[in-house]
Image: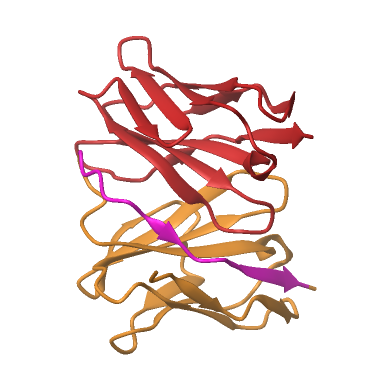
Amino acid sequence: KNQVEQSPQSLIILEGKNCTLQCNYTVSPFSNLRWYKQDTGRGPVSLTIMTFSENTKSNGRYTATLDADTKQSSLHITASQLSDSASYICVVSASGGSYIPTFGRGTSLIVHP
Amino acid sequence: EPEVTQTPSHQVTQMGQEVILRCVPISNHLYFYWYRQILGQKVEFLVSFYNNEISEKSEIFDDQFSVERPDGSNFTLKIRSTKLEDSAMYFCASSRYSGRSASTDTQYFGPGTRLTVL
């Protein structure tokens, strides 16, 4: 069964600090991995999308990495801001027939001043 | 900047009633999706729609659910006979290209409709 596990479940950091969120998956065959930011009560917003051949992708202060061999991804946030407080969701899609994406439960990030 | 819109923002209904959730995708997008998120749980894929037909559907998308693009702008999700467990936030999303294979198209999500079934 395809699964996406994220850690930590929640994280509290001080404004200006960096942090790294983890995503492990068992989805196979792999197509792409996406990171989303979801503010409370809002729809997810796409941060990065990576395919098998990509091992890093940046979007401003967000940098995602992918190791397709170990089936792990990370999202690194640099110089955190109060507005970074949100849930960060890892989503993995398979290829070869079914597109249906598998969502992780998300990491809840709180940035304190 | 174009965005996906959804109406209503909150829908309250009695168990067994039919509800229609409405979405207006971004105008030049070709692929449309519905997701749901039960309070405190992860987002779940329901269905994808392209060229006026369902492309993919999950196990959740059973016979009580249907989708339709009644005109050139709206995309709807109908739940025929709502159950208590249908209470959730329902998100519509759209993308310009296919969501299949190694496509890297971005999906744009709407703000969601919170459905409460009493």
Q: Can you give x and y, in whole percent of width and height, for residue A71 in the image?
A: 38, 16
Question: Where is the N terminus of chain A found, in terms of image quarters?
Answer: top left
Residue at image point 30% right, 32% down? A50
- Note whether B50 is above or below B75 in the view shown: above
Left or right: B56 in relation to B80: left
Question: Where is the C terminus of chain A found, in terms of image quarters?
Answer: top right
Q: Is residue A98 visible?
A: yes
Residue B97 part of the magenta segment: no
Residue closer to the observer: B113 or A96: B113
Q: Quadrant of residue B48?
A: bottom left
Q: Is residue B79 visible?
A: no
- Note whether B41 is above or below B97 in the view shown: above
Residue at image point 54% right, 44% down? A37
* Range drawn in magenta: B102-117
- Note whether B83 is above or below A78 in the view shown: below
Q: Quadrant of residue B93?
A: bottom left
Residue at image point 39% right, 42% down? A101
Hue used for the chain lettered B? orange
Residue B106 part of the magenta segment: yes
Hue used for the chain lettered A? red
